[in-house]
Amino acid sequence: ITVVTWNVGTAMPPNDVTSLLHLNTGEANDVDMIAIGLQEVNSKINKRLKDALFTDQWSELFMDVLSPFHFILVSTVRMQGVILLVFAKYYHLPFLQDIQTDCTRTGLGGYWGNKGGVSVRLSIFGHMVCFLNCHLPAHLEKAEQRKEDFATILHMQQFEGPVANGILDHDLVFWFGDLNFRIESLDICFVKYAIDSNVLSQLWEKDQLNIAKSTWPVLRGFQEGPLNFPPTFKFDVGTNKYDSSAKKRKPAWTDRILWKIKPPSKGWGAGGQQPSQGVLSVSQLCYCSHMEYTVSDHKPVAAIFAVQFASKVDKPQVEIYVADEWSRPEQAVVRYKMAVGFHRSSWDWIGLYRVGFRHPKDYVSYVWARSDDGERCLEKQLCAQVMFSEEALPKGNGEYILGYYSNTSSSIAGVTEPFQISLPRSEEGSSSTDSSGSSSEEDDSTLVLLAPKSRSPSPGKMKRHRSRSPSLAKFQGLILRPSSRDRGTSRSPSPQSRRSLPRNIPTIHLPQEELRHHGVKGKELGQAPESLEGSSFYQTVQEQGGLRHVSADSPMARADPRNLGLLPALRLEMIDQALGQRRESADQGYYPRQKMSPTSPPSCGTSPKEGRNP
């Protein structure tokens, strides 16, 4: 298990986090899970609004980097600027159950979430493990406040279920974050001398957290590896130099990773024998900072742990059987068998995932896990069967994985090994597949993660057209202008409605006097309709024989979808076009429309009972 903590100081993500996650050392093949705790992610109101609609950029970055290594986002939780992400290899997903999250605010007396803790707890092969990411109060003199806040977090966070209701009830707890403990007594000159001379051990005994571990009852049992790396706070942003501002803050190990193993219950180990199940051991293989990252005034810290325990679960809750290859649509048959005691739901579904998928709802298509004899199959331990329709299958060649998603546990209860799909492309299908494939490289929005309890999976076909989060960050030239309604002109229709126009609708043109009014020469009257697409006023209709004048408020003019005002009160326009083309026509109140492709489709849905993807 790899654990990472980083106070990012509201910075934008760096281009590469491969070394931070130890993916370039060959250790990625041995790592099964990764927990990433972030603090001070930009949570200003405009940024939070975008993050509420789309996944934040930091989460997107880690999913992009980890998915090629077959890591899947298991769970995530955010409290303002504090984020926790937990990833696991896809073949471990069926053995990660009872996933729950919680958060506790401690800022401003518990009313503000800039400080506090977020947690993800889950059962890993039958053992209860909790990851706790905290951001505690700052400053040297706030040690007692940090103690009280940590005790509050431990007391407030409670989970459902028969076991491990509190954080310390778990078999294993990882506690990490910007814990903000400082170095006492020593002045800044001696601290910097010890750092430059690489005699860090002289600073350990004055570290507040080291002192607290032996004096605070709430920290009893927590362990930490040796601090053999320089203090991770405070640096000048963009450099590896400690604070050179007027405040000249003293360097400190504020960013820490600790763990605690639950002590065995009374009666265990009687006679000098240990039980075959229930005992686990943890050894720390690595504990280091990463000086190469300079976007924040904190340096990130990473630790790698080897956790050994006897597996209490050896079979997934759902076993899925599928052919080695689907070369014809009729081969897309899925047989699955549910274990005794599995809590089946009519909202369960089986997703078809491309190898390298990012999270449980990042599927290509899905089918509802509903068979007429589902209850009988569960009771008598028989195999149920479902089939993917030909329309739902991806065309072309590729490796895919099937996963059974349990709505009750909000997790994947069974997966297959990768198998091949080799379906021929039709001319029409290949063009649509190619276009959707190219767009999928740019989007992969994880909007569905915001509603993990949603019964139906997110629309798979529309998923490809959602822009990557946050959508506005890609278009740095976009500005917001008031709608044309505010300027007294008719509003342009939405790009979606214009995109779906039939080809045989009447083509609308302006008369010559109207064209001259807008600076268009009369000889251009007979040009293609696209040349006049910017006009928002239509008064003539082109037919086979020539031009026929029609009143502006005639049924023909009103019936054209392009005359309908469908845009909201704000429009997005490019800065360079807006400043160049609109400067002359601003005083006339006329704004030509810009060609824009929609960044996301209109929301739509369908009842799961219809059995169709919207």
Image (tube, grey):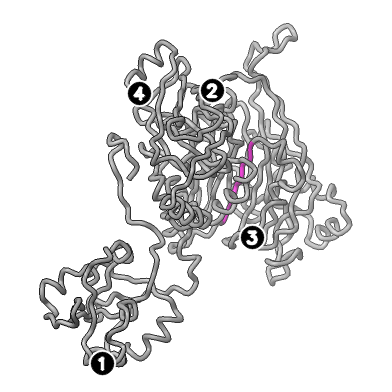
The boundaries of the magenta stretch are 33-40
Q: Which mark is residue 371?
A: 4
Task: State the SS at label 3.
Answer: loop
Sooner in the amino-acid sequence: mark 3 or mark 1: 3
Sooner in the amino-acid sequence: mark 1 or mark 2: 2
Q: Residue lying farthest top?
A: 271
Say which of marks 1 and 2 sits in front. Answer: 1
**Residue 582 placement (x, y as % from top left):** 36, 85
Q: Which residue is mark 3?
A: 14
Q: Amino acid at mark 4?
A: Ser
Q: CA distance from mark 3 to mark 1?
A: 51 Å
Q: Is residue 275 one of those drawn in magenta?
A: no
The front one of 192 and 398 is: 398
Q: CA distance from mark 4 to mark 1?
A: 66 Å
Say which of marks 2 and 3 sits in front. Answer: 2
At 62% from the left and 33% from the top, the residue drawn is 173
Q: Amino acid at mark 1?
A: His
Q: Which residue is mark 2?
A: 316
